[in-house]
Amino acid sequence: MASTVTPGRGILSEDKRAEREELIELLTKGYWMELETVMSYLANSINPDGVRAQEIVESLKQDIQEELGHAQRFGDRIKQLYGVVPGSADFKAQQTYLQPPEQQTDIVHVIKGVIEAENGAIEHYNTIIEFCDGKDLVTQDMVVEILADEEGHKRLFEGFLREFETEGGA
Ligand SMILES: [Fe+2]
Ligand SMILES: [Fe+2]
């Protein structure tokens, strides 16, 4: 009796296998984006020099934990959908714009890199949210919450950029 193995409705049902696999791919991309962001924010919370960098460094230190939490949520959901969270050998770096700047006092480079990373996350998470419409409201709910965090990060760093540009440091 199939009904004891899988529910008859929803994303865990046998009918939805193809959608589930597509969704796992989208979630896996999100998982990697979060982990790369952890690496980039970690380096950029340590490297910068100078008084003006301190606010940014403190903010990034907090974000590292939040982005790691996002990666955990993506991983948990991948497992709930019968996927497997990949190992590190599958990782491919994408964040060219968040590599350490030539001068470690160049904090504007870091701020702009963070905004670009957040923009990338916001775009991808909107894609997942749209994909989930009418298919998987649980994943949709989770990604809506994560999206709200990323929009908050983006807005915070836009404020930092504005201040640096007004001060003529950019
Ligand atoms: Fe995140
Ligand atoms: Fe973020």
Image (cartoon, rainbow, N blue to C red):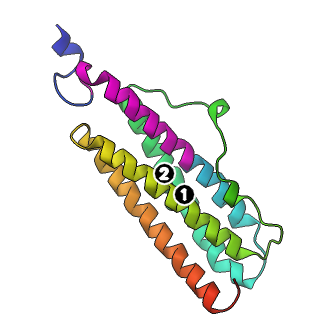
- Whole-percent x and y of residue 144? 33, 54
Local crowd at mark 1 within 10 Å, few (<14), some, or many (≥20)?
some
Q: Nearer the viewer, residue 55 or 108?
A: 108
Q: Nearer the viewer, residue 165 or 38?
A: 165
Query: Tag 2's secondary structure?
Result: helix
**Left or right: 94 as drawn, with respect to 79:** right
> Type of residue at label 2?
Gly
Quadrant containing the C terminus in the rendered view:
bottom right
Work out whether 49 lies above or below 135.
below
> Mainly helix, strand or loop, the magenta region?
helix
Quadrant containing the N terminus in the rendered view:
top left
Work out whether 144 lies above or below 160.
above
Residue 31 part of the magenta segment: yes
Return the mark for residue 65: 1
Work out whether 36 lies above or below 89.
below
Query: Tag 1's secondary structure?
Result: helix
Report which residue position mark 2 lands on. 69
Magenta stretch bounds: 12-33
Local crowd at mark 2 within 10 Å, few (<14), some, or many (≥20)?
some
Quadrant hosting residue 160: bottom right
Contact check, label 2 and label 1, Cβ < 8 Å: yes
Quadrant hosting residue 164: bottom right
- Whole-percent x and y of residue 10? 21, 30
